[in-house]
Amino acid sequence: MVEITGYIDVAQVTLYVFWVFFAGLIFYLQRESRREGFPLEDDAGNKDGASWLFTPAPKTFHLAHGHGVVHAPSDKGDANADPANLKGAQVSQFSGAPWQPDNEMPMLDGIGPGSWTARADVPDMLHNGEPKIVPMREDATITIADGDMDPRGLRVVGCDSIVAGRVSDVWVDRMEHMIRFLEIETEVGDAPRRVLVPMNFVVVKTPRDREKVFYVHAITGEQFAMVPGTQKASEVTLLEEEKIMAYFGAGLLYATPQRQEAYL
């Protein structure tokens, strides 16, 4: 063992250097983890003061596919989360009390299981800049596997067994090679619409007439008329995906009054 003095050797110095390096690494990672979600914010919208020690200096991130730049950390907040913009009321007046929708269509209020985050209003992209999720009519290379059931043309029913419409197309994730949404031509509401139903909310059932149907437990048949739509007929943005999923998630609690009651 190489000694530097009678009391210090190389191994001891190496250990101390490692401790200093590791402490610096932990400090750096803790600062970097605060680029998003900080400073903390309470129910009333009040923010904690930014710490000069633990708040990192702003960085500029250039987004892929020419989608602009993002600065983090940023003072820009989520306007949808501002208590003044929430479409509901707290059930009690203490901090942290849950919010409850207070209008006729609670599934669009963005509360509870229907909450959503303000993601980018652009499609999720492949490495080549093309949309990742597209209807089959837009990509001739995508087909239903031999032996699998083709969803197109089948009826879609809600939790009350009312027929909401028929499947007009299938939206496929071209990266994961799986079905993400069913496109429905609705037969409910004031006028026909084309809406997207997340595949993970769908179950195939065979009723008495023996014609297979897609059963959606989350919402009623009539509520398909109010599913959030898309700006373009063949594209769905990240924000639109978020709102569609939130609508069906909210239906699990708010689709019928009985779902908000206790079991016992």
Image (spheres, rainbow, N blue to C red):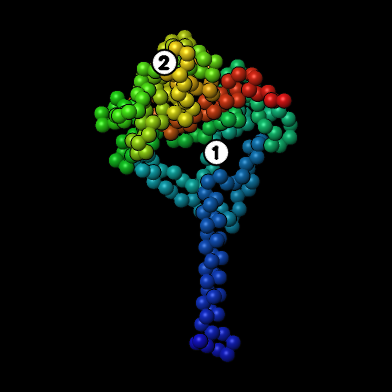
Q: Which quadrant of the view contains residue 7? A: bottom right
Residue closer to the observer: 238 or 146: 146
The Cα–Cα distance between marks 2 and 1, rounded to whole angstroms, is: 50 Å
Nearer to the camera, 180 or 101: 180
Type of amino acid at the residue the image marks with label 2? Glu
Q: Position of residue 43 (x, y in %)?
A: 65, 36
Disc on the earlier residue, 2 or 1: 1
**66 lies above or below 227:** below
**Could you classify mark 2 by the number of other residues whose Cα lies within 10 Å: few (under 14), some (14-19), or many (20 or more)?**
few
Say which mark, if any, is on residue 25.
none
Q: Give amino acid for label 1.
A: Gly
Of the 4 image quadrants, the one containing the C terminus is top right
The quadrant in which residue 24 appears is bottom right
In this orientation, does residue 87 appear? no
Q: Which residue appears at 41% of the width and 27% of the height?
A: 181
Residue farthest to the left, as pictured: 140
User: What residue sits 61% from the left and 53% below the top?
Assistant: 51
Q: Is mark 2 on a helix, strand or loop?
A: loop
Per the rendering, the mark at residue 77 is 1
Along the viewing direction, whichever of 61 and 145 lies nearer the viewer = 145
Q: In this view, does 75 lie above or below 217?
A: below
Instruction: Classify 10 Å Cα crowding around label 1: few (below 14), some (14-19), many (20 and above).
Output: few
Look at mark 2 in the image and give the residue it sits on: 211
Can you give x and y, in whole percent of width and height, for residue 202 in the image? 47, 25
